[in-house]
Image: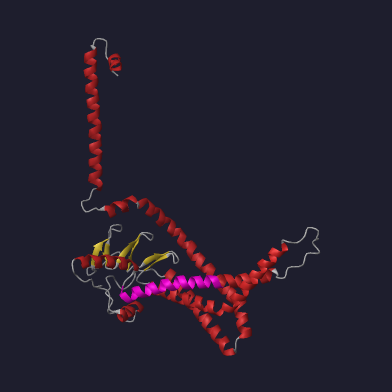
Amino acid sequence: MKWIQVLSCRDEESPEDCLRIGQRRRFWLTQQVEQLWLYGHLCLRSLFYNSFADSDTALDALFEPIYWLVDHVTRWFGVVFVALVITLTTSVVGIVYICLLPMILQTYSIPWIFWHIIYGHWNLVMIVFHYYMAITTQPGYPPQHPKNDLAAVSICRKCIAPKPARTHHCSICNRCVLKMDHHCPWLNNCVGHYNHRYFFSFMLFMTMGCIYSSISGWDMFWEAYAAIEKMKLLDKEKLHVTANQTYSQTPPPIFSFRQRAFHKSIVYAWVLCSSVAVALGALMLWHSALITRGETSIERHINRKEKKRLQKKGKIFRNPYSFGPLGNWKVFLGVERQRLQLYFVDEQK
């Protein structure tokens, strides 16, 4: 290294002078790098440092690209999920009309036939109506030009606008939602103040319809399941046909294509209805418990943390939006509107 510095010096300079010049250059370069590092670090701290920030804020900032990707993908998935709900529901209704209804007309008495026809169609109308209303009804947004008497609890960090009580920002819709419960991909819409009732009613009637279909088609399901098992056994026996048998000697199939499709459709509809009844019924019971306590899904987590915090201080947490089990259901169903504290204008803008 010393020989390189000596060779890079001018001819009239001595080797000792060249070494001193090289040392000064290295020291100057080190200082410049250190100053650049300190300047960059100071810029980052001045732009992003916050004395109130904690580990949760750092994790949110770290996972922000992942959140952005999930939010944008979920928007497109919502359309797919809505189409899937419509397709599956239509397929089950078609199977009921083609397979289950003829059996009811042939085997049941006239009073039971009337009951099945009236109840089945009424339940179907309720499912279609409440699902359509839950999709098309906006959940409710804070007014863009609030009045002076609007009680704003805080300011939304993303909307940079007043945020009334029980209002939360939906990262998928990119808007603040009044009394937000959650963003439902099966509706491709947020569940909030104006459509929460339709969402719950859809779950209720869909669960009732699935239970009705499962109970009504129980006997046909076992018959179809036994027929499918017999088909599998016969298909295995066909594989043991000897090589010297010709095509004309092969026995014809016992079950036709139409019979196979009929039995498989019955099993498909029964399994789908039973699965949806269990899953959606559990979700409906969970939301029933939340409504009874006067909470939403988001407020459930917030209130649980607040309850733990107050317990450490020896205090008791009370939900300010709970009017008792019966009162909460009256407010939810719109029976007693005077109890509901609205922090937004009456007409949705």
Image quadrant holding the C terminus, namely bottom left
Would residue 247 be visible to someone looking at this image? yes
Image quadrant holding the N terminus, namely top left
Residue 288 in magenta stretch: yes
Name the residue located 69 percent from the left edge and 67 percent from the top edge: 234
Q: Between residue 15 and residue 176, name the one nearer to us.
A: 15
Q: Is residue 144 left or right of residue 267?
A: left
Name the residue located 46 percent from the left edge and 58 percent from the top edge: 76
Q: Which residues are magenta?
A: 270-294
Whether residue 244 is situated above or below residue 225 in the rendered picture: above
- Residue 218 spot, x, y in % from top left: 56, 78
Magenta: main secondary structure equals helix
- Residue 171 spot, x, y in % from top left: 36, 59
Q: Between residue 214 and residue 225, name the one nearer to us.
A: 225
Q: Between residue 343 and residue 76, name the one nearer to us.
A: 76
Would residue 217 be visible to someone looking at this image? no
User: Dividing the picture into quarters, in which one does residue 45 lie?
Assistant: top left
User: Dividing the picture into quarters, in which one does residue 32 lie?
Assistant: top left
- Residue 288 spot, x, y in % from top left: 37, 75
Q: Between residue 148 and residue 188, name the one nearer to us.
A: 188
Q: Is residue 330 left or right of residue 216?
A: left
Residue 249 in magenta stretch: no
- Residue 110 spot, x, y in % from top left: 59, 89
Whether residue 34 is situated above or below residue 331 in the rendered picture: above
Name the residue located 53 percent from the left edge and 68 percent from the top edge: 88
Name the residue located 27 percent from the left edge and 53 percent from the top edge: 55
The residue lying furthest to the top in this view is 12
Give the number of callouts: 0
Colour basis: secondary structure
